[in-house]
């Protein structure tokens, strides 16, 4: 029904309708943000080389959704993404002051020799880029690079009609 509404609102233009649907999924996810998560799955993925793998806890509100094959596939897709992209943090809130200070220290060394007026801007730009690459929810999803993992979860929230969240993840590697 939402697809039909988006198409009508976009005047039949599929690209505009997709943009409208993405905006709608964000607002729907925000409305469900305070709901309690009482069910979920442990999802995993091990790469074919058997040298790297990931597990995660993907939560939802009900067992009905947790047992849905599409929800289970979402968990596997996110685990595969974790294996491929090696995130360090789940969300921006998980980045500590110590992590930020270490990164700034490295970037300050890289900015040496640049004009004083530009150093702070260079360091902040590098920090922003670094964090977007290391925060799972901010990373472009490997199977669909035009959306982030956060947008993927918001899309699933809209699809299943329940709040969905990644509680935690771990990536394992032999090397």
Image (cartoon, rainbow, N blue to C red):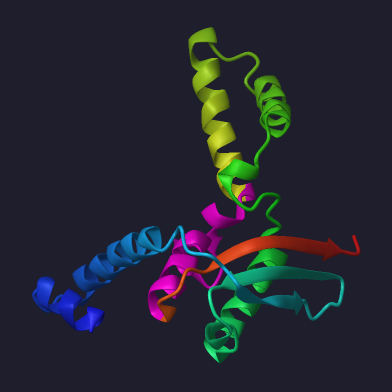
Q: In this figure, what is the number of numbered marks?
A: 0
For the residue pair 152 and 14, the one nearer the viewer reads as 152
Residue located at (57% from left, 91% from top): 69
For the residue pair 6 and 124, the one nearer the viewer reads as 6
Does residue 82 appear to the left or right of 126 in the view shown? right
**Residue 145 shows up from this direction:** no
Q: Position of residue 6 (x, y in %)?
A: 19, 74
Residue located at (11% from left, 72% from top): 9
Residue furthest left as drawn: 11
For the residue pair 44 and 158, the one nearer the viewer reads as 158
Residue located at (40% from left, 77% from top): 161
Q: Quadrant of residue 1?
A: bottom left
Residue furthest top as drawn: 116
Q: Position of residue 100 (x, y in %)?
A: 66, 31
Residue 31 colored in magenta in the image? no
Residue 96, placed above or below residue 156: above
* Part of the protein shown in magenta: 134-159
Residue 149 colored in magenta in the image? yes
Residue located at (63% from left, 76% from top): 40
**Residue 114 shows up from this direction:** yes
């Amino acid at each position: 029904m939402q697809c039909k509404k988006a198409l009508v609102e976009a005047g039949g233009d599929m690209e505009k309708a997709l943009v409208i649907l993405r905006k709608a999924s964000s607002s729907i996810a925000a409305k469900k943000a305070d709901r309690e998560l009482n069910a979920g799955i442990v999802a995993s993925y091990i790469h074919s080389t058997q040298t790297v793998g990931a597990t995660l806890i993907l939560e939802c509100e009900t067992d009905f959704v947790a047992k849905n094959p599409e929800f289970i596939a979402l968990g596997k897709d996110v685990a595969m993404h974790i294996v491929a992209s090696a995130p360090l943090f789940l969300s921006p809130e998980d980045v500590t002051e110590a992590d930020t200070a270490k990164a700034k220290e490295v970037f300050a060394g890289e900015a040496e020799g640049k004009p004083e007026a530009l150093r702070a801007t260079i360091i902040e730009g590098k920090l922003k880029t670094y964090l977007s690459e290391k925060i799972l929810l901010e990373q472009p999803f490997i199977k669909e690079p035009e959306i982030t993992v956060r947008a993927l979860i918001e899309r699933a929230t809209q699809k299943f009609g329940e709040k969905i969240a990644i509680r935690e993840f771990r990536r394992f590697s032999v090397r």
